[in-house]
Each structure stands twice: as C-alpha cells, then as structure tokens.
Image (cartoon, rainbow, N blue to C red):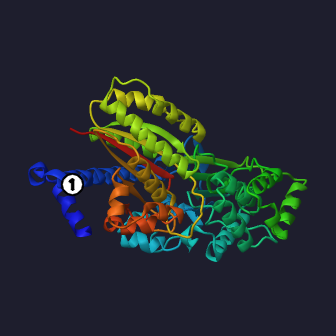
Amino acid sequence: MAAALQVLRHLARAPSAPLLLRGPLARLASSMALAERARQLFESTVGAVLPGPMLQRALSLDPDSGELKVRDRSFQLRQNLYLVGFGKAVLGMAAAAEELLGQHLVQGVISVPKGIRAAMERAGKQEMLLKPHSRIQVFEGAEDNLPDRDALRAALAIRQLAEGLTAGDLLLVLISGGGSALLPAPIPPVTLEEKQTLTKLLAARGATIQELNTIRKALSQLKGGGLAQAAYPAQVVSLILSDVVGDPVEVIASGPTAASIHSVQDCLHIVNRYGLRAALPRSVKTVLARADSDPHGPHTCGHVLNVILGSNALALAEAQQQAEALGYRAVVLSTAIQGDVKSVAQFYGLLARVAGARLALPGAGASVEDERLCELAADLQLPDLQLKEALEAVAGARGPVCLLAGGEPTVRLQGSGKGGRNQELALRVGVELGQWPLGTVGVLFLSGGTDGQDGPTEAAGAWVRPELTSQAAAEGLDVATFLAHNDSHTFFCRFQGGAHLLHTGLTGTNVMDAHFLFLHPQC
C-alpha cells in the first residue's frame, strides 16, 4: 500500500496527471497532490519561526564599541555577558547567539531535549549546533517532554550560574516551548517525583497549560520569576519564542523571568476544580503554606527585559502569504485555538460544511448549520476568532480556499494508547468530515506541531479527508476504538501504511500547533 501511494504521489505531481489517471485513481492522485501541498505549506510555516533568523533580527552588536542592542535598549559588554536557556528551540537559539556575540560571552548553560543534538546532526542542520569549542555547556534531558533527573541537574546548574552574577553583569536568557519540563527545580521538601505526579494527574483530567503552569510556578525555585530573582542584581534580558496562546511572558515556560500574578488560593482553586485536594502530598501543602505567609511577597522583575522573538501569529502570517502565492484565498481564523479537542474537532467539521456550502453556492443565505457553528465558536471562547470575516471571504472566493488557525487544544486522557493532540485532532476531524455530505467541495484538514514532535511520537501531526472513516473500515480499522484509547498514532501508522502522518523531524523551533483547512471546488 505504501509503495503504491508513493507512485501515486509522483504521478500526481506530473503535468500529464489528468491523462495518466482516470476515475478513482485520479481522485486519489489529486488527494495526494493536495496533501503534498499541505505538507509544503506546513514546512514554510515552520521556516518562518526558526530561531536563528529571529534572534539575529532582535539583537545587534557593535564590534568596535561592544554595545549590544536589544530592540530599543542598549547594554555595554565588557566580559560581563552570561547566557542560560531552556526549551526545544534553545539549541539553535544558543548557536545563533554565540555566533553573534563571540568572545563577549563568558559562560553559558542550556537545557535542551534529550537526543536533540544527534537529531540535528542526522538532519544536517549544522546551523542549529554549537561549535566544537563553545563556551556554552549543554545538558540534555526531559525525554518525551517530561521532567527528569537530567533536566533537574541542568536546572540546578542554571541556578548556580545565575546566583553567582553581580550588579555589573548581563544575563541573556533564551526561552522557548518545552522550557518548563527542562527547568524542574522543586522547592524542598517537594521532590521531582511528587511534582510530576501532581501535574500528570491535572493534565489527565483536562487542566489547561495555564493551570498547569500556575501549579508549577508555585512549587518551583526558578519559575514564576525565580530565575530573575536568582540573577539579581544583574541585568536580565530574556529572548522568548512563544508557544502559548496570547504570548503571555508569565506563562511561557512557566515565566522564569516574569513575576507570577497568581496566589496560593489560585493553586488551591485549580486543585479543587479537578478533585485532587485530598491527593496533595504533605510536602506540597508545606510549600504552599510557606508561600502564603511569606512576608517578602512574590518576586519582582524590574531588572528584566522580556522580548517576544516569535509566535504562532508570525508563523500563520507566513502561511497565509505562502497559501496566497499558491492561488488560495487564505484567511487566518485564530491564533488562540484552545479547549477540549473533541469540541475543537466538532467546530472544524461544521466549519468545513458551512464554508463548503458558501463556496459551492456563494449566494446562499444563513442556515441552521451557521447558527450551530456560531454556538460552537462561542463555547470555545476564542478571543481573536475571525469567523464572520472568514466566511465572507469564502463566499467571495472564486477558487480554492485555505483557512488557517493555530493554538493548543487539550486532550483528556482516557486510555493508554500512543498519540498527540495533533494526531488526535486530525483523527476526530476526519470522523466529523465523514458524517456530512460535502457536495462538490473537496476538503483536507491538517494539524501539526511546529516543534516536529506530537506527543511521545516521531510525527508532527497528520492530515485527513472526509473518506477517512470508510477507508479505515475497509482496512479493518475501527476509528472509534482507537479514539477511545487515545491511540491516534497507532491508527495513523496502520492506516494506508502511515501515508497520512506528517513527518518533519525535530524542527528546532516551537510556536504551538498549526491547523489548515483546505476547500477545493470540484467539477
């Protein structure tokens, strides 16, 4: 099956494809061509937020005077520059920073995902790697994006460097998505295992990334402004690649250089919401009680400059431009897609039907489906949703349409399968698309993580079409069973030889997920 699909992909790219293929084969080849276009668009999206170019745009160094400019601020370098970093994109960010700063950099420590250097070497991404005699020490840890002992050692090394700085020093902090797992430093007597258990329980019950970070910050020596406090009185400049909706610096990587705005009562409210108050270890209760009575109050960060380097919005702007260059009417729906993955899938499924009807019959009025779509959108509470504008654009389009969105939906774990939120979202959208006739409009949906790794898998995400459920059934695959076990990756590996999986390898960046909905008028 996989070999046949490869042949069809090759034929679909050929100018003579319409002459070579007829009937069902022609439709399959067309599907593969559209999938290939979707993959290329995703790669362009990721390319817009690679760490090196973004960091170089934010920093400039005068080699003669030693003056470092960060946006509109200037800092004098005189053997007083130090660097720390943590996150999935930080290896490439550090390589670009050291290339720019050269001998001005005294010392650095970074915490990056386990295996990332070997992966970058295999991929030939030399620009993402530090030079052989780098002044930056690299720790690898947080396998499968989970805090571990290796990441703890890295966090303690980062804390040690920060605590040794003086008033004349400058600390450059590189932060990206995945940074929270790579900077675990629980406040004693809380152990790493106790903190992990609590956050896993919360995640399994559907806690949002914001709620998880509130708990992490309350129990951490370095998060919630703790790193900035450790570096005081040195000046701190944080360069941040955002993987959080709205780009709040206090949430990204749990805000190590931003004062926490949350209280102990906020933490208890979250724990109560998910029914975990009774499960709190004694050590966690001790730390929360101590924080509640701390006369010094929360950390302050007046000596810190936080700069957002890149975001989901920047990535989608590039995707929109590239899609338009390919002949699509492209519209960015939202950069803040969040909420339960089931609800998000229902929204995309109904959006495909409503938008497809507008594309097929531009003069058609509002329908019951339009009203239901608005209700689903309201339930998701997306602050920047451009639904009305997108549907108006679809109605006015004279050709194919590409609706773009980004964010980070939440998966409620109910099984022990293997997958990630992008593959689960794609699979659920595939089911939704197959429930309604879409008439003369061809549809393809793609969901991918910009870091190239969706959950504990080697895939970035997946793409689907309305025929997914029926085609899977023909192969003896019951989609509902896979979804019941959160086993989306296993499904896509088996379905059509894995042809629907999106493979990019580790990209070296991370600005949440990208969702593409393609609508093609068909004769």
Q: Please determine whether, in this image, residue 432 is positioned above or below residue 402.
A: below
Indicate left or right for 397 with 149 as reference: left
- Residue 429 shows in the view: yes
Name the quadrant containing residue 253.
bottom right
Q: Residue at x 69, y 53 (%)?
A: 211
Query: Residue most toward the bottom?
Result: 149
- Between 151 and 425, the one lying in front of the other is 425
Q: Position of residue 371 (x, y in %)?
A: 51, 30
Q: Position of residue 145 (x, y in %)?
A: 56, 67
Label 1's element? helix
- Residue 458 shows in the view: no
- Between 268 and 98, the one lying in front of the other is 268
Q: Please determine whether, in this image, residue 302 is positioned above or below residue 418.
A: above
The number of discs equals 1
What quarter of the picture does the N terminus occupy? Answer: bottom left
Indicate left or right for 185 with 25 as reference: right
Disc 1 crowd rating (10 Å Cα; few below 14, some 14-19, many 20+) is many
Q: Please determine whether, in this image, residue 50 is positioned above or below residue 517.
A: below
Name the quadrant containing residue 32.
bottom left
Q: Which residue is mark 1?
A: 29
Q: Residue at x 38, y 68 (%)?
A: 493
Task: Name the residue type under label 1.
Answer: Ala
Q: Position of residue 74 (x, y in %)?
A: 59, 45
Q: Please determine whether, in this image, residue 251 is positioned above or below residue 162.
A: above
What quarter of the picture does the C terminus occupy? Answer: top left
Q: Residue at x 41, y 35 (%)?
A: 354
Q: Residue at x 21, y 54 (%)?
A: 29
Q: Position of residue 502 (x, y in %)?
A: 37, 60
